[in-house]
Amino acid sequence: MNATVTVVSVHDVGPDTVAIEFETPAEFSALPGQFVKLAGEVDGEEYARFYTLSSPDVEDSFEVTVGVSEEGGPFSRHLAALEPGDTLEMQGPFGSDHYEGESRVVVLAGGPGVGPAVGIGERALADGHDVAIVYLDDAPAHETRLEELAAVGATVMMDDADADLVVHLRDALSGARDDTVFVYGFADFVDRATAALDELGHGGELKVENFG
């Protein structure tokens, strides 16, 4: 769908990282792990970027997590400077590699993949399912939500960006066929994650979102 969305709040969730909450437009429906396209104008130039949902649902509002850096360009800085009541154009949702009520969820998140990781983790736990999250980043975001997930039963492992995924995956995977593994991150992380899964012989369902 195409809609104009209104900002509810913007807050810091880590180094150079913000979470932006929007009012949910009428008839918008999405699942954790799906993504939307946000568009706006900065200094007379039009920008449009994709952002994965980081909220467990979209009932009244939905959230995206945005990294703010030189590589992110002027649009990421524009998003970080938004205030309640500001608006953007939105399209979506997009993506088929999302949470669908799986009974055991293992999320591998690299860098910006932490956004969908916390959203999926919170939703799956609320549904009464098992959750394990492996998150690699030298400057982690959403640490408070990850700590809260761990406190209510999720297995949460955090480490540096270059940590050995195989080591953490041995603890995260149950070895059962009903493990559904989600991988979210940039291409190099996705390659490392899929190689680690192959090494450990994971034969269950795999859902991958490559951020490029």
Image: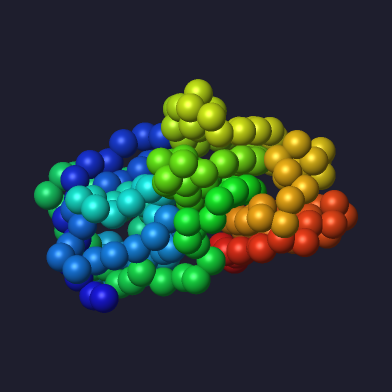
Quadrant into which the C terminus falls = bottom right
* Image: 48 above or below 183: below
Residue extending farthest left? 85
Give the side of residue 122 with respect to residue 110, left or right. left
Q: How many marks?
A: 0
Above or below: residue 20 compared with residue 211: above
Q: Relative to residue 99, is residue 84 drawn left or right?
A: left
Q: Quadrant of the N terminus?
A: bottom left
Between 68 and 191, the one nearer to me in the picture: 191
Residue 104 in the image, given as x and y percentages of width and height:
59, 48
Residue 160 in the image: state x and y as whole percent: 70, 35
Q: Could you tell me which residue is drawn at 50 percent across and 71 percent down?
A: 96
Q: Which quadrant of the structure image shows residue 209?
A: bottom right
Q: Quadrant of residue 52?
A: bottom left
Return the x and y of residue 18 as percentages of the image width and height. Answer: 38, 41
> Which residue extends farthest right?
199
For the point 55% across and 33% down, the residue is 154
